[in-house]
Image (spheres, rainbow, N blue to C red):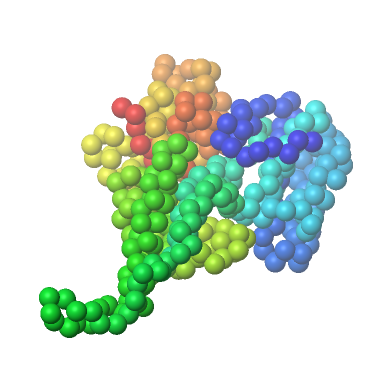
Amino acid sequence: MADVRLDLETVRELAGRRAPDGFLSVYVDAASGRAKGLRDAAIELKNRLGELERNLAENGGTRPASLRKTIASLEPDLEWLTDPTVPGRGRALFAAVGDGERLRFTSQMPLPNRVVYEEHAFVHPLLELLDEGEPTGVVVAAEDEVAIYEWKLGELEELTRIAAADSLEAPHERSGPVNVMGQRRATTPAREQRQARERDRALQLVRRGCADAAHLAAERGWGRVAVSGGERLTDPLAEGLDGKVAAVVRDRRNLAGFGRPQLAEAITEVLSADHREREAQLLREISDATHSGKGTLGLSDVLGALNDGRVAHLVYDPYVRYVGTVGEDGRLYPPGEAPPGGGPAAEETRLTERLVERALETDARVTPVEGAAEQLPEAQGIGALLRW
């Protein structure tokens, strides 16, 4: 058993693996209700595995015995999936039926309860997780300190912390009147001077934090940076990063006093909401791009573009089961279409998996969008941005 770090390269390699008797893919939501939720998940997992064995037994062949043997050997790993003492809100297990190979993943972001047995590893939930949990910069500012983190898959890693000078009051300052040019006038009270100095120092600190965050964004490839500094410092943070990073997400709460777990949870909440809006924007972008030839919608056109390696960014609804055929040369076709010249083609009821494999093979970005079929009903929720 190997506990594997979750990244796109690992998912790409997993999606391309083959096993003589197929793959068993198991996902568990370990976030809902913890102990009670995991007890329910354990019962559901047992029921789904039992149903899977019964369905296979009805079809006959050698696979039921192979699957039954694999499930029996997985008992410790299945217990791990629903163990409340194991960290991670989402857990996944992949087992190649018959040859003993298996992989495990954990994540601080939730995964759906799923049990899938098919020719290839079922990786769509991992792709959703990677897309939503992409590395993101986080800048949290207080009056006397700026902290910069990297958020990834629901976890926070502190990268740097910038503190202001300890002293905020110059020793020579005094309140009271002074005489200037023979005239007596009141100076600014010491408290007002100190407050003005604190504001200036906080803004200076924000500028330093923004410079460091912009440098880290370029170095680490962040597509967005979340900023939080309460009502006073959030906008200066965002303005300081405007034009220096691809996108800025504002959170006007004062998060500087949060502990690490609470901060990670708060940031995850904000970034998840932003991700949903970004998905909706992506669908609008693809729809608009079809008018200029830089995008395409619908299964037939997307498959054609994938076959030619023209897809830069594939979007599909993971809850729609796309079907079609695969030609002898590996090209993909929608229902009703056949290879040129009427060549042979095999029916493919799991066309979504082939779509994803082809996209990953050609280094296209893949974004599963739940509900895409509702937003793009005429296209069945599938579209793409094109390279040419």
Residue in the image at 35% along x and 60% along y:
203
Whether residue 281 is visible to the viewer of this picture, yes or no, is no
Q: Report x, y in % for residue 210.
A: 38, 50
Q: Is residue 143 above or below residue 218?
A: below
- Which quarter of the image is occupied by the N terminus? top right
Q: Going by the picture, which residue comes out furthest to the front?
A: 182
Residue in the image at 52% along x and 21% along y:
330
Is 5 left or right of 385, judged from the image as shown?
A: right
Is 345 left or right of 284, judged from the image as shown?
A: right
Q: Is residue 241 above or below residue 195?
A: above
Q: Report x, y in % for residue 341.
A: 42, 16
Q: Nearer the viewer, residue 378 or 159?
A: 159
Q: Report x, y in % for residue 378.
A: 36, 48
- Which quarter of the image is occupied by the C terminus? top left
Q: Nearer the viewer, residue 383 or 226?
A: 226
Q: Report x, y in % for residue 161.
A: 51, 52
Count every numbered label the image shows and give the total: 0
Q: Is residue 144 above or below residue 359?
A: below
Whether residue 38 is visible to the viewer of this picture, yes or no, is yes
Give the quarter of the image for residue 296.
top left
Residue in the image at 72% along x and 63% along y:
34
Residue in the image at 45% along x and 36% along y:
219
